[in-house]
Amino acid sequence: MLEDVRKYFPRGLVQPESGFRFSTDSLLISSFVSVSKNARILDLGTGSGVIPLGIMLNHPDKGLTVTGLEINPEMVGAAQENVQKLGFAEEINIAQSDVCTPDFAPAGSYDLVVSNPPYRSEGRGKACPDEDRNKARFEVDCDLDAFAATASRMVRNRGRVCFVFLAERLTELVNSFTRHKLEPKRMKFIHGRVDSPSKVVMIEAVKGGKPGLILESPLVLFEEGTKLTSSAVEYCPFIKK
């Protein structure tokens, strides 16, 4: 039964009626991250726990431990239920805390910090009537720089930080990373279709790293209509489910 639940991930995950609904972006970054054996991983703003679960399913034999940080108590409950449902209670811990003022672990505790932070500055874009969902979409409580600052504080020196974010705000993201001693090392743009501009970018940085950026081949999600490309499914099998 557990094998079937994992096989059909992310189908069947618990998500509160209010609050952020996970997107393809969270699934994609769980395939983008590179992890070493026995790595300690932190997910900032974990929501229903999709990114930690995706990372564990991609790397079941690496002895990983993952902490998912979330401020919304309903989301914390949903994430904990999902972790139990997929049988990762020993590997994944869901902690309730504020990204802006984390108090759950000492600085430098993690080898990798990953995040799908809110994409929009408050006041830019149509607000959502659901307050919790609005906070997940817009920088209401914590802005991009706060996420980058916490990522830098919580990751060890030479550790890695991976964010998925809006391509149109790439300059802000890079500036925020470098301001907090996170040197961009790897970047991948996501396109809806081959002839459309990129809307999303995934970026990996190294704390205290030297300059040297690798721009990976872009990933195109769709071809005819809403049919997923074979390259997208090969890159992240979770998106076809």
Image (spheres, rainbow, N blue to C red):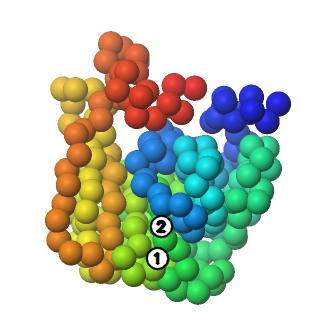
Q: Is residue 216 visible?
A: yes
Residue 107's x, y, as percent? 52, 86
Residue 185's x, y, as percent? 25, 62
Could you tell me how far apart the alpha carbons at marks 2 and 1 are, in whole angstroms?
6 Å
In this rendering, position of residue 74 left or right of residue 158? right
Residue 128's x, y, as percent? 52, 49
Q: Are marks 2 and 1 in contact (CB under 8 Å)?
A: yes
Q: Amino acid at mark 2?
A: Leu
Label 1 sits on a secondary structure element that is strand
Q: Is residue 52 above or below residue 179?
A: above
The residue indicated by pointer 2 is 112
| Disc sitting over residue 155 in the figure | 1
**Residue drawn at the location 22% of the way across and 40% of the way down:** 217
- Count neighbours of disc 2 (C-alpha within 10 A) and say few if under 14, some if 14 to 19, many if 20 or more: many
Residue 71's x, y, as percent? 65, 68
Label 2 sits on a secondary structure element that is strand
Instruction: Please identify the quadrant where the N terminus is shown.
Output: top right
> Residue 172, located in which quarter of the rendered image?
bottom left
Q: Is residue 147 above or below residue 107?
A: above
Instruction: Please identify the quadrant where the C terminus is shown.
Output: top right
Q: Is residue 240 above or below residue 78?
A: above
In this rendering, position of residue 78 left or right of residue 239? right
| Disc sitting over residue 72 in the figure | none
Between residues 59 and 76, which one lies in front from this camera angle?
A: 59
**Residue drawn at the location 69% of the way across and 59% of the way down:** 92
Q: Count of labels shown?
A: 2
